[in-house]
């Protein structure tokens, strides 16, 4: 047995010419640093990701964190220059107790000085200077690596752009400190320790193994150990869980040095970034964007500890991560953690997240590549959140830069751009700001620019014309603007003739309803009639009650499935269907006010009672109506209807089974268009006209069309793939 572990493959070493002064005042000569790199450093010296490893790991991050390493992952050598240095005091190539003392030529052993976490980072900073690194895009580390990340951020406020801290804290918490001290005592009390001057071939193996076993209990979760081992025994009676710990201890003895374990563990125990003050005061100096990843089953650095860390960091955010593997979850579940880290890595450095921002010259373009500045309001709602996920997809490549997101409570503006996959999370963590401030900034900012309104807000919809008249494109599934007064619609349509706009998702979500009407009109055709079922909610209720379900059961299902509001009176009144019919007619060239569309609600409930109780008085009559239609081979349909002779109306009607509308089931939308050119065969459009994904996909298709108009041919090459994608959602 030896206490000199094998060095990692592809290890590089470099020794500073000058001695390294430690925090204790001691001078360390020949402070060799062992390190590994992947990828190529660019000419600017700024495409760097620096990885700080944990207690007993090495510089070989590609081995111990394989789930984050490789093409398309956080540590992608094709994109970044990745550096991982073995920490000072360890035994994998950097100066440590197993290294030769240049004064004696013998192992340092107990003569190797005590260390602090700041010593580890000062050692690495020398290496960064030697490698010609001017800017580090991300410093990331877990556990003891997280301690180093904080020191990096403090010592390098300019060179370090952003930091990610995983399963760590601003200090060694009391319980972790106590457990670590016990581990050190196991080593020191091993008779073979000999005060630290043990021979390389006879180390204190038993003490180190016991230390590792105790440590490993804090690295894994109780639930995992119970599930994996319970109280099962081996054939010799030894508990399986104890056999597992024995194995972990033996593994460490074969690959690590006991005195290195002591020096680094004691450096961790001494670490307190907020010594003599509060963490809030100490961490206020860390201005870089910081992602704090909390593992929900971590028994070493509790989630509450990491929550406080995230709150104390001026640009910190907390990412809760679910794992069954405790503190080691960042290793075992690395593949699941990787996309979250990669998204944060690609997030531009935050410029401002306040209610108002500095003005920008309107004549200036969004950037030299002609990107379109994009803002999404309603970004944490169901449709807005799904749209951001679609924009984050590798299959979608539009010339957009997401510069702002907002909801009813907060707003974030970031001129460099927000990664769509993290923007919603960033907004949920933000306090302050307002959607109106986003609109004001777009109005005063560079062109081209585009706003997506994924709200149902009348206040936001009211600003659509203002935006379009100022040259800011607008895309929305919000029905309020295109279904408002006829004078407002006329102004909206005139503004949209000069500046791109899209509201196809207002009717039928992803179905090509409005586009078909526009094409008929553009071809010189003229509609003779419209018959349509346009409410997925009411379609569900009618389908279920005609199958024998009660009104209460059908509406409860609709609420539970998110098809209806918690109080479904707004759905039952039919006003939403009337708005949709008004939009369709206006697209067909019929000038109509919404109030001139006759409206008979599906049900008018007693407003003094909870809706569940109010339904009771309708149950018997409703069931009889459903049965009467079935006996006559007819079906009830909540129909939007228009013809020149009949005018426009929305009402519950009985239709023969042979009628095209009668074939619709569930949440299906169905539109029957009769026109002069198409007569006598009607055009029937049917499909899923409700749902988050199809609506978000329809918004995305409108974004595509607006991009084509805003900057021309660059977007053309994406059209075929995007249309195919949207067809899958329809």
Image (cartoon, rainbow, N blue to C red):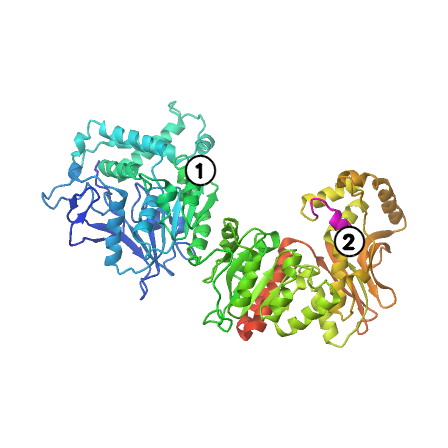
Disc 2 or 1, which lies upstream in sequence?
Answer: 1
Q: Position of residue 252 (x, y in %)?
A: 29, 37
**Residue at image x 77%, y 40%?**
552
- Determine whether, in the image, residue 102 is placed left or right of residue 33: left
| Residue 637, placed above or below residue 684 | above
Task: Tell which of 117 and 729 is nearer to you.
Answer: 117
Q: Residue at x 40, y 45 (%)?
A: 166
Does 255 sit left or right of 398 as displayed? Answer: left
Q: Where does the image place residue 5, in percent across and percent down from the top left?
A: 24, 42
Relative placement, left or right, of 239 versus 680 is left
Badge number at residue 574: 2
- Image quarter in which the C terminus is found: bottom right
Residue 394 horizontal/vertical position (percent): 50, 60
Q: CA distance from mark 2 to mark 1?
A: 48 Å
Q: Quadrant of residue 532?
A: bottom right
Residue found at x 35% / y 32%? 174
Magenta stretch: give its range: 564-572
Q: Which residue is mark 1?
A: 304
Outermost residue on the bottom side: it is 524
Looking at the rendered image, the quarter that the N terminus falls into is top left
Query: Which of the pair 562/471 is nearer the observer?
Result: 471
Q: Tell me the element at label 1.
A: helix
Toward the left, the furthest residue is 104
């Amino acid at each position: 047995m030896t206490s000199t572990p094998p060095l990692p493959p592809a290890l590089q070493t470099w020794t500073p010419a000058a001695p390294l002064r430690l925090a204790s005042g001691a001078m360390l000569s020949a402070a060799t640093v062992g390190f590994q790199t992947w990828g190529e450093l660019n000419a600017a010296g700024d495409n760097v990701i620096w990885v700080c490893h944990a207690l007993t790991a090495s510089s070989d991050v590609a081995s111990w964190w394989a789930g984050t390493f490789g093409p398309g992952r956080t540590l992608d050598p094709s994109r970044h220059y990745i550096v991982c240095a073995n920490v000072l005091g360890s035994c994998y190539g950097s100066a440590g107790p197993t290294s030769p003392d240049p004064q004696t030529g013998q192992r340092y052993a107990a003569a190797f000085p005590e260390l602090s976490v700041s010593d580890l980072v000062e050692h690495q900073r020398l290496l960064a200077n030697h490698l010609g690194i001017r800017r580090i895009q991300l410093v990331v580390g877990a556990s003891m690596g997280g301690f180093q990340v904080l020191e990096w951020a403090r010592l390098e406020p300019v060179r370090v752009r952003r930091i990610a801290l995983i399963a760590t804290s601003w200090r060694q918490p009391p319980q972790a400190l106590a457990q670590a001290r016990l581990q050190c005592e196991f080593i020191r009390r091993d008779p073979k320790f000999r005060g630290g001057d043990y021979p390389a071939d006879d180390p204190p193996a038993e003490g180190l193994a016991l230390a590792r076993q105790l440590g490993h209990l804090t690295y894994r979760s109780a639930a995992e150990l119970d599930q994996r081992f319970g109280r099962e025994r081996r054939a010799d009676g030894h508990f399986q869980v104890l056999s597992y710990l024995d194995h972990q201890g033996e593994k460490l003895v074969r690959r690590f040095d006991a005195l290195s374990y002591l020096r680094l563990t004691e450096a961790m125990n001494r670490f307190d970034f907020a010594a003599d003050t509060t963490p809030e005061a100490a961490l206020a100096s860390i201005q870089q964007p910081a992602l704090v990843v909390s593992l929900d089953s971590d028994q070493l650095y509790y989630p509450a500890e990491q929550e406080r860390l995230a709150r104390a960091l001026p640009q910190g955010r907390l990412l809760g991560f679910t794992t069954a593997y405790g503190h080691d979850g960042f290793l075992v579940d690395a593949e699941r953690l990787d996309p979250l880290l990669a998204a944060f890595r690609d997030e531009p450095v935050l410029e401002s997240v306040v209610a108002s921002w500095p003005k920008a010259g309107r004549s200036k373009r969004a950037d030299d590549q002609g990107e379109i500045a994009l803002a999404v309001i309603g970004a944490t709602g169901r449709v807005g959140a799904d749209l951001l996920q679609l924009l984050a997809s590798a299959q979608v490549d539009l010339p957009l830069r997401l510069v702002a997101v907002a909801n009813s409570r907060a707003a974030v503006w970031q001129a460099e751009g927000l990664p769509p996959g993290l923007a919603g999370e960033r907004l949920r963590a933000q306090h302050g700001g307002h959607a109106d401030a986003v609109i004001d900034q777009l109005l005063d900012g560079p062109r081209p620019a585009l706003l997506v309104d994924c709200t149902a807000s009348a206040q936001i919809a009211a600003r659509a014309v203002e935006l379009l008249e100022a040259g800011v494109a607008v895309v929305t599934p919000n029905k309020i603007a295109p279904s408002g007064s006829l004078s407002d619609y006329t102004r909206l349509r005139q503004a949209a003739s000069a500046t791109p706009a899209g509201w196809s998702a207002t009717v039928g979500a992803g179905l090509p309803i409005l586009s078909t009407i526009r094409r008929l009109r553009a071809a010189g055709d003229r509609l003779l009639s419209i018959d349509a079922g346009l409410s997925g909610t009411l379609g569900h209720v009618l389908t279920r009650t005609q199958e024998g379900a009660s009104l209460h059961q059908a509406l409860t299902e609709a609420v539970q499935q998110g098809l209806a509001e918690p109080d479904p009176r707004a759905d039952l009144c039919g006003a939403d269907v009337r708005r949709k019919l008004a939009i369709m007619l206006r697209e067909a060239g019929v000038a109509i006010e919404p109030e001139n569309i006759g409206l008979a609600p599906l049900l008018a409930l007693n407003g003094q009672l909870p809706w569940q109780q109010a339904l009771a008085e309708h149950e018997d009559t409703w069931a009889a109506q459903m049965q009467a239609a079935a006996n006559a081979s007819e079906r009830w349909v909540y129909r939007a209807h228009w013809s020149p002779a009949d005018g426009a109306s929305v009402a519950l009607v009985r239709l023969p089974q042979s009628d095209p509308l009668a074939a619709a089931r569930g949440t299906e939308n169905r539109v029957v268009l009769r026109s002069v050119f198409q007569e006598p065969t009607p055009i029937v459009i049917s499909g899923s006209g409700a749902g988050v994904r199809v609506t978000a996909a329809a918004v995305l298709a409108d974004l595509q069309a607006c991009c084509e108009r805003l900057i021309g041919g660059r977007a053309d090459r994406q059209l075929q793939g995007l249309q195919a994608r949207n067809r899958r959602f329809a």
